[in-house]
Image (cartoon, rainbow, N blue to C red):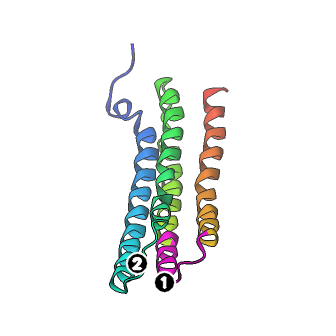
Amino acid sequence: MEPTGMVTQFKDLGAILVLALSALGSGTGAGVAGMSAIGAWKKNFSQNKSASFLLVALVAAPLTQTIYGFIVMNKMVSIAMGGQYLWAIGLFAGSAIGLSAYWQGKCSAAACDAMGETGKGFGNYIAVLGMTETVALLVMVFTLVVLGKFSGA
């Protein structure tokens, strides 16, 4: 029989934290970048210049961090089903992944502004976004390694 109580009711808290915080960063980052893309398009349209659709790729860049949070969440759910509560791992991993997404969105916003102004440099901007993305990837991989030790894998 499984024990009941306030703590037991929240055994999945770490798992939902990692997803929620990752998604919070993704949504915020994409929102910041999206506002910048809309401003760049507005400027292009008002000057009768062509507006690059490539800005959508810059806006979408922070969304991948939600996927990383989902991957970590899945591993954490299986461990939580075994009775281990990993709240701190979910809190800190989710925060790190979410912050990566937020700052990637800020970089994307700057890239949208620059691309909208010059129409050049897309490859350079993607390289910078890849660097901020790498932080989230590393957090995901290292968290999965640590979770593997909790699950005995």
Q: Which residue is mark 1?
A: 117
Q: Which residue is mark 2?
A: 40
Q: Looking at the image, which residue sits at the far bottom? A: 47
Checking the image for residue 74, the label placed there is: none
Q: Is residue 72 left or right of residue 20?
A: right
Q: Looking at the image, which residue sits at the far top? A: 1
Residue 120 magenta-highlighted: yes
Q: Amino acid at mark 1?
A: Glu
Within 10 Å of the Cα at label 2, are there few (<14), some (14-19), or many (20+) other Cα atoms? many
Q: In whole angstroms, how far apart are the C-alphas of marks 1 and 2?
A: 7 Å
Q: Which residues are magenta?
A: 107-122
Residue at 39%, 55% (x, y): give it: 24
Residue at 58%, 78% (x, y): give it: 120
Residue 95 at what x, y percent from top left? 48, 55
Dot 2: what SS? helix
Q: Amino acid at mark 2?
A: Ala
Dot 1: what SS? helix
